[in-house]
Image (cartoon, coloured by chain):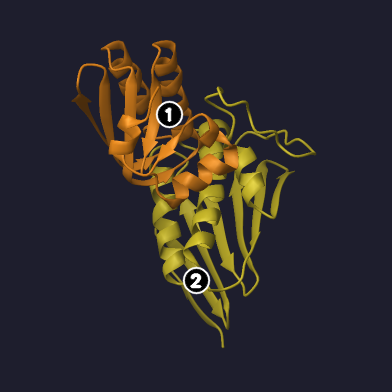
Chain colours: A yellow, B orange
Amino acid sequence: MVRRTQHVVPGAVIAKRQVMHWIEHDYELSAKLPEGIEQLHTALATFWAATHLSAETRMRFGTALAEVIANILQYAVVPGDPPIKLRLRCTPTILEAQIVDQGLSWTMPDTTIAMPEHWEERGRGLAIAQAILDKLQYRRFRNVNCWRLVLLHKTA
Amino acid sequence: MEITVNPVGEQAAVVQLRGRLDLLVANDVKQRLVKAVNEGFRLLVIDMSEVSFVDSSGLGALIGGLKAARLAGGDLRLAQPGAQALAMLELTTLNRVLRPFPNVTEALQASL
């Protein structure tokens, strides 16, 4: 069974697709603070309402995703850039986020991102995301940044 | 986020935070914590019971407050952090320096 609805509202769900045990939502997040962060939390609340995941899984994935989006909003895009596209997908085994933005390119280290020393006040975001997730990928295609976050899970 | 500083005696204060402690408020929170230390409150207990979410910037603000408190010969302690905040502290190993306590009373009573 496939149900699909589509409507475009900035900052809201722009597409939903549902196959048996397979849920996918597309969102657009403003490239501006604080709107982008507020819209992310709204998007997550909407997505969690459509899934049946444990509180711990939701917490871990939400924490990792918020760190990546915060990095994009602070360092890659500037207000006035096109919205950040976010696709959230939940299958029986994985939770996945695909993020596309048109901001500055990144240099991601090939190895594990080191957690800063205790007294550092900055620089933990991507290290936290990487530590939580089973996969954190970044690729630059032409003029867009593509992130993929994957967390393995068991549906509660 | 709401930030309320409640003095407890002359050298301690309970800082009540409500809402998300994230990049949108981290700078304000750090400034309030440093200001409280500069006003003489060298022991700051952060009441985390109504903080729904903490991100890395929020942790950075707490570290900023902790550094100010330690420089003044005091400490910054977290009271009743929620599951997400505790997970962040453990993941970053910041629980070694930002000590979590089950409640405000115990955080205030522990020795410096």
In the displayed structure, A96 sits above or below A123; it is below
Q: Nearer the viewer, residue B94 or A56?
A: B94
Task: State the image coordinates of residue A14 (x, y, percent, origin top left).
Answer: 46, 63
Q: Nearer the viewer, residue B12 or A137?
A: B12
Q: Residue at x 71, y 49 (%)?
A: A137
Q: Quadrant of the C terminus of chain B?
A: top left
Q: Residue at x 27, y 12 (%)?
A: B40
* Total marks in image: 2
In the displayed structure, B21 sits above or below B97; it is below
Task: State the image coordinates of residue B108 (x, y, percent, origin top left).
Answer: 31, 30
Task: State the image coordinates of residue A134 (x, y, percent, origin top left).
Answer: 69, 55
Label 2 is placed on what type of residue?
Lys
Q: CA distance from mark 1 to mark 2?
A: 39 Å
Residue A130 shows in the view: yes
Give the quadrant of residue B64. top left
Label 1 is placed on what type of residue?
Leu
Residue at image mark 1: B62
Q: Residue at x 38, y 24 (%)?
A: B30
Q: Secondary structure at mark 1?
A: helix
User: In the image as oriented, which residue stretches furthest toward the bottom?
Assistant: A1
Chain of residue at mark 2: A
Chain of residue at mark 1: B
Q: Secondary structure at mark 2?
A: strand
Give the quadrant of residue A7. bottom left
Residues at badges 1 and 2 in contact (C-beta under 8 Å)?
A: no
Q: Residue at x 45, y 72 (%)?
A: A50
Residue at image mark 2: A16
Q: Nearer the viewer, residue A73 or B95?
A: B95
Q: Quadrant of the N terminus of chain B?
A: top left
